[in-house]
Amino acid sequence: MTWWMWMALGVVLAVIELATPGGFVVVFFALAALLVGVLDAVGVARNPVLQWVLFSALAVVALRLFRNPLLRWIRSRDHPHAVDSLTGQTAIATTDMAPGQVGQAELRGSIWKARNVDGAPVAAGQRCRVVAVDGLMLDICQE
C-alpha cells in the first residue's frame, strides 16, 4: 500500500474509534496505520510485507503497553469521589439542629443527613456551609 492509503486507513480507524463506545482498542490500530504511513512516506518501509508486519506488531505492542494505563488514567478522572466536591457548598437546613445533633439539609435538590459541627444551633431554613462529607452524612456549620 502507498503511504496515503495507510494514512487514510489510520483516519478511518480513528473515526471508528470515536463513533463506537469501545474501550480504546481501534485507536491503537489507527496509530499504527498512521505510523506505517509516515515510515512509507520517508522511505523506511517500502516493502508491502514489511508494512503489514510493522502495522500488526505496532498495533499489538501499543495495545498491550498503553491501553490499561490509558483506561486507568481516564477512570481516575471520572471523579469517583465526586461527593468530596460538596465541601464548601451551601446547604439549607430542613430541620432544627443543636450543636452536635444530626438532622437534615437540602443540597443540590436532594435531602441529606446532616450533622451540625458548629458550636451554635442551626435553625430550619438557615443557610449552612458544608465543611466535610462522611459517607452520606454532611458536616455543616453556619455561614
Image (spheres, grey):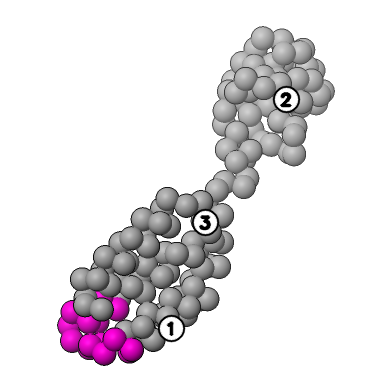
For label 1, the crowd category at 10 Å Cα-Cα, with few meaning under 14, some 14 to 19 and many 20 or more, is some
Q: Amino acid at mark 1?
A: Ala
* Residue 34 x %, y %: 30, 71
Residue at numbered disc 2: 112
Residue 47 appears left or right of 135: left
Q: Is residue 117 above or below residue 49?
A: above
- Range of magenta residues: 36-50
Residue at 63 percent across and 38 percent down: it is 83
Q: Tag 2's secondary structure?
A: strand
- Residue that mark 3 sits on: 22
Magenta stretch: dominant secondary structure: helix
Label total for image: 3
Mark before the other along the chain sequence, 1 or 2: 1
Q: Alpha carbon of mark 2 to alpha carbon of mark 3: how far? A: 36 Å
Element type where label 3 sits in the image: loop
In the rendered view, tell whether residue 22 sits above or below residue 135. below
- N-terminal-most mark, 2 or 3: 3
Figure quadrant of the N terminus = bottom left
Q: Could you tell me the amino acid type at mark 2? A: Trp
Q: Nearer the viewer, mark 1 or mark 2?
A: 1
> Is the Cβ of the residue at disc 2 closer than 8 Å to that at disc 3?
no
